[in-house]
């Protein structure tokens, strides 16, 4: 195992010759306490001395968890084996579907100013005892949910662990009965109501949203203790079809509206619902930033027309930003969340975008289940059907969940 840095809680401690004996005794007690906590929590669970923060505030402004670098670590990563996870999705099981280069599993995220707490399933389950952790959004956050399920189930596997699907497949519930804890995913790719809300049959030629309607979805997660949202991928088009009225109403009014404007309207509907319905003393809120795609190799210096297919190495250029990630959309998210904060409701942004931009080799590419038989044309041109949007597991989404774990662990 890699060496663990010495961990110090609170202000930097030191022993000087001029200290009174009482100070020396107190220092010894603190060291003993730190050792006890390290043993109790597990290796790598606390932040390193570099953060210089108190034990009650390990996520201080002095440590930006999202600013750092990828470090190759084939001793302690991956955090679980693909075959260990009983609930792995065939959409993300790249090794199962023939991928041979598995180094994408061995990368650890290292923040510049601190250490990211190592995931500990038992510690998380203690925080989730008698609680619900619900991921709400599209297939990217569903992948993050699968990652979290695998992280927990592979470490705390039990015949009592169960999976249940309800609401026509929209809500998937992983239950750890020993802790009465549930980790759930609710399919709502645009957060508000849309004609893409069916978890199976959601591919439509013209996407339509009811930009003021969210209650249909929200009733499934309004009593959750931890809510993790995302919405980005399904908005990537110049204009959206907006419906005022219901889908069943023949007199409903449809209008094409510029996408960024509709995105803001939908997020404001979401934020207004949170402000009215969330129990501030109970529910913790998170929003996961946009997940990058790697569909144009020329953006990172590759061959024009290629994509993530055959990629085995990450992008090394610091600050690389692909055209698939829209800063304007992220600014809208930040503004809406900042306005919520002024009204007394805090939503933590889990900023996964920049660190995931580097990981062009982390996608399934052609190594996933194909839901429909491939044509001869597709087989002869793998670039054409390579999945450069989702992520292999174990892989990048495990780090996203380490961020989430750090927030939950330190509350």
Image: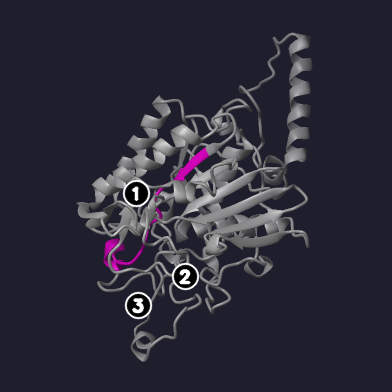
Q: Nearer the viewer, mark 3 or mark 1?
A: 3
Residue identifier under label 2: 364
Residue span colored magenta: 285-301
When the figure is inspected, residue 165 is found, relative to residue 214, above or below; the finding is below
Q: Residue at x 26, y 74 (%)?
A: 305
Q: Is residue 300 magenta?
A: yes
Within the image, what quadrant is residue 29 found in? top right
Q: Residue furthest bottom?
A: 376
Magenta-colored stretch includes residue 316:
no
Front disc: 1 or 2: 2
Residue 64 left/right relative to 401: left
The residue carrying pointer 3 sits among few (fewer than 14), some (14 to 19) or many (20 or more) residues within 10 Å by Cα, namely some
What residue is pinned by disc 3?
A: 383
For label 1, count other residues whose C-alpha is less than 10 Å away and answer few (under 14), some (14-19) or many (20+): few
x, y percentage for residue 349? 44, 40
Q: Is residue 158 left or right of residue 283?
A: right
Q: Give how far across and how far down residue 68 sits, in percent.
A: 46, 45
Label 2 and label 3: CA atoms lie apart by 12 Å
- Percent across and percent down for residue 66 are 46, 43
Pointer 1 residue: 319
Is label 3 in a helix, a strand or a loop?
A: helix
Q: Nearer the viewer, residue 184 or 197?
A: 197
Front one among 368 and 41: 368
Q: Between residues 213 and 21, which one lies in front from this camera angle?
A: 213
Q: Secondary structure at mark 1?
A: loop
- Which quarter of the figure has residue 301? bottom left
Residue at figure coordinates x 63%, y 28% from the top left = 55
Q: Which one is earlier in the sequence, the residue at label 2 or at label 3? A: 2
| Of callouts 3 and 1, the N-terminal one | 1
Question: Along the horizontal axis of the image, is 189 left or right of 278?
Answer: left
**Do the numbered discs 2 and 3 sit on residues whose CB atoms are within 8 Å?**
no
């Amino acid at each position: 195992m890699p060496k663990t840095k010495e961990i110090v809680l609170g202000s930097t401690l030191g022993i000087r010759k001029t200290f009174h004996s009482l100070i020396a005794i107190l220092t010894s007690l603190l060291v003993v306490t730190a050792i006890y906590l390290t043993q109790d929590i597990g290796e790598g669970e606390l932040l390193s001395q570099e953060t210089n923060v108190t034990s009650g505030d390990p996520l201080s402004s002095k440590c930006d968890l999202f600013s750092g670098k990828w470090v190759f670590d084939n001793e302690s990563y991956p955090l679980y084996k693909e075959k260990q996870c009983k609930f792995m999705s065939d959409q993300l099981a790249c090794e199962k579907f023939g991928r041979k280069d598995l180094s994408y599993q061995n990368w650890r995220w290292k923040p510049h100013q601190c250490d990211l707490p190592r995931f500990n399933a038992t510690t998380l389950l203690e925080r989730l005892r008698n609680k619900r952790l619900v991921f709400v959004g599209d297939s990217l956050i569903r992948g993050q949910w699968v990652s979290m399920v695998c992280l927990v189930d592979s470490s705390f596997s039990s015949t009592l662990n169960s999976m249940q699907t309800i609401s026509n497949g929209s809500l998937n519930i992983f239950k750890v009965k020993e802790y009465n804890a549930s980790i759930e995913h609710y399919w709502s790719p645009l957060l508000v109501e849309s004609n893409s809300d069916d978890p199976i049959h959601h591919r439509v030629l013209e996407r339509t949203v009811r930009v003021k309607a969210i209650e249909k979805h929200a009733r499934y997660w309004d009593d959750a203790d931890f809510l993790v949202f995302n919405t980005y991928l399904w908005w990537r088009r110049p204009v959206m079809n907006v419906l005022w009225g219901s889908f069943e109403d023949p007199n409903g009014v449809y209008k094409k509206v510029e996408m960024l404007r509709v995105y803001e309207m939908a997020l404001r509907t979401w934020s207004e619902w949170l402000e009215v319905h969330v129990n501030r003393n109970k529910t913790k809120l998170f929003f996961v930033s946009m997940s990058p795609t790697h569909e144009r190799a020329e953006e990172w210096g590759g061959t024009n027309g290629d994509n993530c297919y055959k990629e085995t190495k990450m992008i090394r250029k610091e600050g690389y930003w692909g055209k698939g990630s829209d800063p304007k959309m992220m600014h809208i998210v930040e503004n809406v969340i900042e306005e919520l904060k002024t009204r007394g409701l805090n939503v933590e942004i889990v900023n996964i975008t920049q660190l995931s931009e580097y990981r062009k080799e982390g996608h399934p590419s052609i190594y996933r289940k194909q839901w429909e038989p491939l044509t001869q044309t597709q087989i002869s041109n793998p670039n054409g059907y390579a999945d450069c949007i989702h992520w292999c597991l174990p892989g990048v989404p495990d780090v996203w969940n380490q961020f989430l774990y750090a927030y939950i662990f330190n509350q």
